[in-house]
Amino acid sequence: MCGIVGYIGYREAWPIVLKGLKRLEYRGYDSAGIALMNNSGQHIYKKAGKVAVLEEFAETQDKSGTIGMGHTRWATHGVPSDRNSHPHTSNNEKLSIIHNGIIENYATLKEELTNRGHDFKSDTDTEVLIHLIEEIQKIEQIDLLEAVRLALHEVNGAYAIVIMDKEHPDRLIAARKGSPMVIGVGKGEYFIASDATPIIEYTKNVIYLKDGEIALITREDLLIKQLDNVVQTPLIQELELKLEMLEKGGFDHFMLKEIYEQPRSIKDCMRGRIYPEEGKVQLGGIKEFAEKLKNIDRIIIVACGTSWHAGLVGEYLIEEYARIPVEVEYASEFRYRNPIITEKDVVIAISQSGETADTMAAIEMAKERGATIFGICNVAGASIPRLTHAGVYTHAGPEIGVASTKAFTAQVTVLTLMAFYMAQQKGTITTSKLIELLTELDHIPEKIQIALESNDLIKEVAEKIKDSTNCLFLGRGSGFPVALEGALKLKEISYIHAEGYPAAEMKHGPIALIDEEMPVVFIATQNSSYEKVISNIQEVKARKGKVIAIVTQGDTEVKKMADYCIEIPDANEAFLPLIATIPLQLLSYHIAVMRGCNVDQPRNLAKSVTVE
Ligand code: F6R
């Protein structure tokens, strides 16, 4: 949450920082600000609203300078407003700061600083930190780097910060703990950002700043220290990201592009991992734990939001094929309980961003209690892959639309592969069965392509239900997590209230909601619960609900009852979630567009939830 960008070098900083903020806007977009330094001093421009509002506001201002930093905000402390926007300045206005994260003990620090005569101009925790740094520097009479280091010892919470000093227009100071930060290394220039997307067009060489590290960055040099003052040798890595991955490529929205990318992203996810002719799955990332997997007692999956839904699909698959008991937990609940975890447990943490604060805290707790931790992440080099013992990347490519689409299906693909891999290790599946399943899995991308071809029909359905105020999504078995995911997509981007439910649970409560105004979306494909779902559809029709059904190609039964049917290709039940999710993503997308919503940046949300 919150995106930060910094630049120091020989080029004009404004366009680099501004473009970087646009790339990072998915992390938060309620206000934005940029600070620059040039011969006439320090200039700070900040505005509530999107980066475009800031751009317009600063159009006629002095934007020269080869050192600068910018911030796009997702509000935690203080409403989105001009004065709460970053950068914030110290009491003497010589220092300025941008910050991603939360300073938990800000209230106590603020009180102490107020007693010492500090005046605060905003309601933010961030402003308290820069005042604290100024105060420490003043009292101790030390260099700014040292003052920042000492101040960071006094704060609790998470941060990625960049600091500019009016008196030293030749350096930036950056630090991180719990929030991500990448430093791009150029010739005579450095870039700083929350992720690599603002950096990629200038350099492929990056350093991922580690937790508890602080950096002093000048045009020519970079010094990295740990907070305990030990100097570090930076590890420069090469980015694999490509610029075209960050563009809309002719689509109206990133979300639509990402929905259409799924046949490709799932192929990428499976590449080199499945061998259908031999009936074999290879997962290099967890290979060293292959033996351990034969004897584990239990798997606990921890995740949030859409990733949690993927976890529910994983539960179904792992229990079905590997016969290992699975529990799926919201990371935010799990970490605050006192769960029973043993050394024989494997915890699988699922996260697109690899930065979700609750998921990270859940991992840390399970690790302390001796569990083996696997990660399923999309963003390479993020914090979660570093925290885990082993893991499997989803390789879905950058997901920029805030609502997760291709990352979800890639997570489900990895979980499918893990289920088969564990089954293979434990001997709970025969090679001939694996040959059959993997051969079909190999062709799932083509089936997804066919599912995408229903787009025009889905648009027509969207037109019919776009003005609804509520919507129910019902499914059974692995269709249930699909229903949950369909409901989440609809509510988060169209702001229509939607609930996902196991179809059979409807009669225990939600059935009371059904009337002629209520659209009910059923996952009604021909699998083991088909007959039961048909009964549930009848129950809805008997109460005059509007039924939209996702059905298997060629279905005739459901067609007799449903108001609208969207066909998807037939597939083994194990692969149903990968295909049935597609029409639900498109349905939410079209409804949101028709309602005039900002599909890629829905209100109040951010792509990477780095606050608890
Ligand atoms: C919904 C969505 C969120 C995320 C959740 C976890 O479309 O994207 O629910 O799934 O915030 O994020 P990650 O997967 O990055 O840990």
Image (spheres, rainbow, N blue to C red):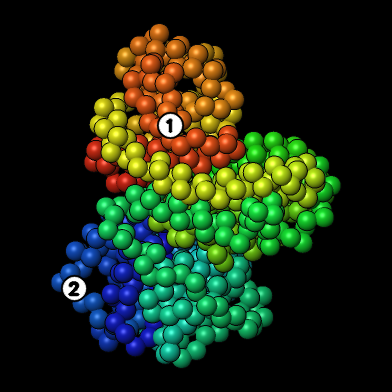
The quarter of the image holding the N terminus is bottom left
Residue under the point 34% across and 24% down:
564
Residue 12 at least partly seen:
yes
Residue under the point 49% across and 17% down:
534
Q: Position of residue 60 (x, y in %)?
A: 15, 72
Residue assigned mark 1: 553
**Secondary structure beneath disc 2?**
loop
**Secondary structure beneath disc 1?**
loop
Q: Residue 477 or 91: which is nearer the viewer?
A: 477
- Classify 397 as above or below 214: above
Q: Position of residue 207 (x, y in %)?
A: 54, 77
- Left or right side of 383 for 248: left
Task: Point out the tag, 2 or 1, that comes first from the N-terminus.
Answer: 2
- Left or right side of 323 for 3: left
Label 1 residue near ligand 1, CB within 8 Å: no
Label 2 sits on what residue type? Gln
Q: Which mark is residue 61?
A: 2
Q: Residue 135 or 167: which is nearer the viewer?
A: 167
Instruction: Give the residue at the far top of this rendering.
Output: 542
